[in-house]
Amino acid sequence: MAEPDFIVPPPGLVPSAPETAAPDRTVRAAPTRALPPRALPSFVPGRAAPAAPRPPSPRGAAPAAPPRSESAAWRLVAASGAEIVIDGVLVLGRDPLATAGSKARAVAIDDPTRTVSKTHAVIEPAEEGVRVTDLRSTNGSRVEAPGEPLRELVAEQPSHVPVGAALYLGEFGLRVDRVVRSTV
C-alpha cells in the first residue's frame, strides 16, 4: 500500500452501477438515488414547456412533410422531472384504488410529505387540457392557470385544467403539458 491510512478494496468487492429496471408507474416526489441526466422541462407554474426543435433537413432535400396524422395526449410533470402520461382515465393518490367497474388506471404518487390522499383525484383527458375531479381528499386540490389566481377545486365536481397550468394535489405540484405523438 502506498499510503498507511488508505485501504484499497480487492477487485470485484465494490459493485458496479445497478442495471436499470423496467419503468415504474409510481411518481416519486424526490428521487432516492442519482438518475442519469435527462433533458426535461423545469417546473414553472403558469408557463408551458417549449416545443422540441425539429432536426434540419439534409442539403438539397425538400423540407420534410409533417406527419399525416397526429393525436394529442396530455401529461403531468412533477418538479422532480417525473411524468405521468394521461392516455385515459387515471386515479391518482399515494395508494389509489380504481373502482372495479371503471376503466380507470390507478397511478401511485410517492409523496414524502403525505399531503396527497390515498385516493386523491381522477384525471381524464379533455380538449385543451385535462379534467380533474377531487375525490374528497383531505388536503384538497388546487389549480393555478396562467394569468389566473390560485383556485380551490370543489370536491366531486369535474374541473377543467388547461395546458401550462399547475395542479396541486395537497402540496404536491404537477404541471399540465401536451405530448404530441405521431400515429403514422
Image (cartoon, grey):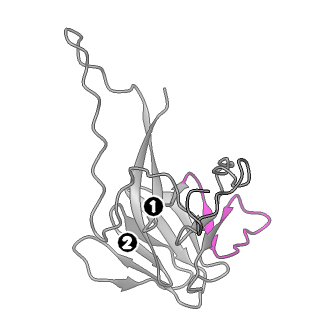
Does the magenta portion include 18? Answer: no
Our reading of the magenta stretch's main secondary structure is loop
Residue 177, x across and y down, in percent: 39, 57
**Residue located at (46% from left, 54% from top):** 74
Q: Which mark is residue 134?
A: none
Q: With 47 as the anchor, is 170 left or right in this view?
A: right
Q: Secondary structure at mark 1?
A: loop
To which quarter of the image does residue 152 belong? bottom left
Expressed as whole percent of the image width and height from the top left, the position of residue 34 reads: 53, 61
Q: Position of residue 164 (x, y in %)?
A: 32, 63
* Distance in Å between CA atoms under marks 2 and 1: 14 Å
* Of labels 2 and 1, the one closer to you: 1
Q: Residue at x 27, y 64 (%)?
A: 47
Q: Amino acid at mark 2?
A: Ala
Tell me the residue that label 1 is attached to.
81
Identify the residue at image location x=42%, y=47%.
Answer: 179
Is the residue 128 above or below the residue 68 in the image? below
Residue closest to the eye, 166 or 6: 6
x and y percent of residue 31 in the render? 55, 67
Q: Residues within 10 Å of mark 1 (few under 14, many from 20)?
A: some
Q: Secondary structure at mark 2?
A: strand
Question: Which residues lie in the magenta part?
Answer: 86-107
Nearer-the-camera pick, 18 or 118 = 18
Residue ID at (25%, 15%): 58
**Which residue in the protein does label 2 denote?**
166
Q: Nearer the viewer, residue 99 or 37?
A: 37
> From the viewer's perspective, is 23 left or right of 68?
right
> In the picture, which quadrant includes the N terminus?
bottom right
